[in-house]
Amino acid sequence: MLSDSDHIRNLVSTYVRNVDARNHQAQITLFTEDAPVRVLARSGEDEALRHGPVIGGKAFAEASAALRRPIPASRTTRHCTVDHLIEITDRSATLHAQFLLLHTDADGSAGSIVSVAETGIYRFSFRDDGDGWRIAGLDIVVDAPAGGEQSTAP
């Protein structure tokens, strides 16, 4: 039997795998209908809103589909999350995790090139309304060093 922490970690893993697969419709059921999702850019201690908030899984799926370009056949993307900090209080919870977005591109000579495309922090909130844990809010905080280029993908 899975613990609440395990269920929450599984939600995060399902979320990032759906993002990598560009399976926007699968994201809808992971979120509560009132979940705010924002994308922020962080430079030093400062954070600036870049996108959102959009409210609920359906709005987030639509926004993601509109903002994200199709993945070229020669590329694989992987969001990797590390350093999960989980707090659970009664039927609500938070999970903060650092993330890396890796791109693996075929280089045309039967090899591949792996690059770090983006780094940042996910700040998730969760709620268990009796039907299981769902994402009740998400801030995607993308590192944007001063003078650096910023991605526009959520």
Image (cartoon, helix red, strand yellow):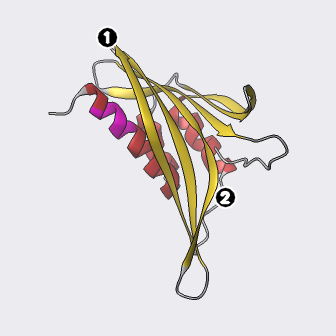
Q: Is residue 51 visible?
A: yes
Asked which secondary structure carries label 2, the reply is loop
Which residue reaches farthest top?
90
What span is colored magenta in the figure?
6-11
Image point (49%, 35%), residue name:
97
Image point (42%, 35%), residue name:
30
Q: Within 10 Å of the Cα at label 1, are there few (<14), some (14-19), or many (20+) other Cα atoms?
A: few
Q: What residue is disc 2 on?
A: 69
Image point (39%, 45%), residue name:
14
**Residue 90: which disc?**
1
Locate residue 15 relative to residue 128 in the image: left or right: right
Q: Magenta residues: mostly which secondary structure?
A: helix
Q: Amino acid at mark 2?
A: Arg
Image point (46%, 31%), residue name:
31
Assign the N terminus to one quadrant of the image: top left
Q: Amino acid at mark 1?
A: Asp
Residue 48 position within the rendered picture, expressed as x and y whole percent measured from the top left: 76, 29
Q: Would you identify the image quadrant in which residue 4 lies?
A: top left
Q: Is residue 32 visible?
A: no
- Foreground pick, 15 / 59: 15
- Foreground pick, 71 / 107: 107
Which residue reaches farthest left?
1
Instruction: Answer whether labels 1 and 2 touch (C-beta < 8 Å).
Output: no
